[in-house]
Image: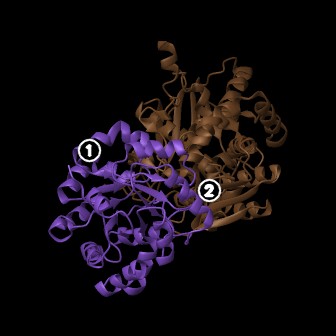
Chain colours: A brown, B purple
Amino acid sequence: MTKTMETNVYQVNEKGFYGDFGGAFVPEMLYPNIEELRKTYLSIINESAFQEELNILLKDYVGRPTPLNFAKRLSEKYQTQVYLKREDLCHTGAHKINNTLGQILLAKRLGKKRIIAKTGAGQHGVATATVCALMGFECVIYMGEIDIERQNPNVQRMKMLGATIRPATCGSRTLKDATNEAMRDWIANPVDTHYIIGSVVGPHPYPDLVARFQAIISEEIGIQLKEKTGNPDPTHIIACVGGGSNAAGAFYHYLDKKNVKLIAAEAAGQGVNSGYSAATTFLGKKGVLHGSRTLLMQTQDGQVVEPHSISAGLDYPGIGPMHANLFESGRAQFVDITDDESLKAAILLSRIEGIIPALETAHAIACLEKIKFSPNDIVVINLSGRGDKDLNTYIKSGIIDQKNE
Amino acid sequence: MTNRINQLLTQTSNHILSIYFTAGYPNLNDTMKITERLELSGVNMIEIGMPYSDPVADGPIIQATSEKALQNGMSVSILFEQIKDLRQKVKIPILLMGYVNPFLQYGAENFLKKASEIGIDGLIIPDLPLELYQEEFESMFHKYNIKNIFLITPQSTDERIRKIDSISSSFIYVVASFSITGTKFGIEAQQESYFKRIVDLKLKNPTVVGFGINDKNSFEKTCKYSNGAIIGSSFLKHIEKNDITLDAIKSFVKGIKE
């Protein structure tokens, strides 16, 4: 009995909470949508036919399992053993498709005809538009006007895949505003539409649903690490956290294994105390954002503060409730990485391993500079996405013209 | 304990007109002026909106007025300060409408105590879930004699509506359509059948319809099936165009009620 309770500390409970965090703070207009999902999601995704269909697509369409790549030169530089979990090699270039594929199969079984989503960096939008094309669903993507400008290649990809892009023109015109717009669409179209949330945020059951679809990452890490080292457990897992879906996936099977240290890289923007930051665990307080109780950046009056990060995917004022609980309980260590530190890490990984990472992912790589690891440590970094989409930002930053050190 | 909402609903069973506006819009200190002028214009009840940065249940008009109000510097504390002498001037029921995060940050109990001292009669917090309200807040609302108003929608099952009816003790806010405020104007036939369904449930609480009510025609139609209606976005559009003078506000109310 005690054991069951202990092993469930970091997972969602029956009421949809992770410790103090989570729940479903939704207006009554969304209650039926959320209830439908809450009542059905576990039985649907645990069906063997569902699992079989998903696994075939993950293998043949996404290209799973993604490699676990021993990073030799990076390991030498930091005097430890670094493994890269290559989610950047997934179809569409990031881990996001693990979730969208799962959710579109769920939407199909719920009899939905139309998909809506919101996107920040555009990775989730592309991953959603991709699976909609694959399964023949109508697809509407909400995106902040600012993000549309800074992520133009992804916007064009979504259009090419047949999606309609609707810009969010209110507020900060970034991810959080796109989220509001998408929720409004769902309120207005409750019957035929499924809302694919791309991160472990939003009302219950979304955080758990998305975490389960991303859990394939840690499942594979365990298998692959055992093959390579004889032990499925690394000493450390590092992942970046905006909402936190790639981190949730990389941590999932290790949540209850206390011998594995979990490290979450947050976007500090121009510095935690600069006023231009998105480091939620450093700057946030308990509150309710987008349907769940979590840590969020807010004023004393409870208004949501507009975050800043060079990385569109981490530019979010909250974090998923699972991560808020990992932070509060001390289970995960949160590290603040500035825009500059992430740029340095991006050029380093490009030059030393031949991998151009997404800016989001570069925040995880930058943790190697901040934390001292031992030569015997096995450090798995979740390489959540590739950097093609960020090329413009890399060019503008001037790092590309830097000479090798 | 008497409550002005219940007094109103006992005295008047039909054509109750409730107007929503965003506190701090168009100017920070317009709150009391608008409130007083709405009462003078013959409105039966007022909802003062507390602006929030992420108003997911509202449409573009209320989002824009909220944004402006926040830029003007509006906050919960300032609002309470502005309306502290409310009951020396205004007699009709006053509700506050806003989102759960500012309510929680102010401190739920502090908020209810302060609102009660001022003479606020009810709260509408769309993203405060019913279950959580029952677990954590119901007794506090009772203690301070503040009514919590719940919403029902065309998607709400009969069972859900009955549950909401059982824990409500003033009125039920009937969301008129599959929409958010200020997006779909007018009342369609499909909605009338939904209104009839609610009438047939013979609820113990009166009902007031909101979302999409914008003119005399839609007001009259909803009043056939309910005790009244709430108008928000279309009033905000009117004052944006015509200012907040007594004449401007009177002409809006007249256009609905006469």
Q: Nearer the viewer, residue B231 or A202?
A: B231
Let me know if residue A283 appears in the view. Answer: yes
Q: Quadrant of residue A384?
A: top right
Mark 2 residue type: Lys
Residue at figure coordinates x 68%, y 46% from the top left:
A96
Q: Is residue B172 above or below residue B86?
A: above
Q: Are marks 1 and 2 in contact (CB under 8 Å)?
A: no
In the displayed structure, B241 sits above or below A215; it is below
Does residue A103 appear left or right of residue A271 in this picture?
right
Label 1 and label 2: CA atoms lie apart by 40 Å
Q: Which residue lies under the disc numbered 2?
A: A118
Query: Where is mark 1, residue-wise?
Result: B142
Q: Nearer the viewer, residue A322 or B76?
A: B76
State the residue at coordinates (44%, 36%). A327
Residue B171: x and y in percent read: 37, 54
Q: Position of residue A68 (x, y in %)?
A: 72, 32
Q: Residue at x 72, y 34 (%)?
A: A69
Please give the name of the residue rendered at 60% of the width and 35% of the height, measured from the top-left corner. A39
Q: For this rendering, which residue is in front, B101 or A372?
A: B101
Q: Position of residue B119 (x, y in %)?
A: 20, 59
Category of crowding for the residue at label 2, using alpha-carbon neighbours closer than 10 angstroms: few (below 14), some (14–19), many (at least 20) = many
Where is residue B40 drawn, in percent x and y?
A: 26, 78
Which mark, residue B246?
none
Query: With respect to residue A283, does B22 lie above or below?
Result: below
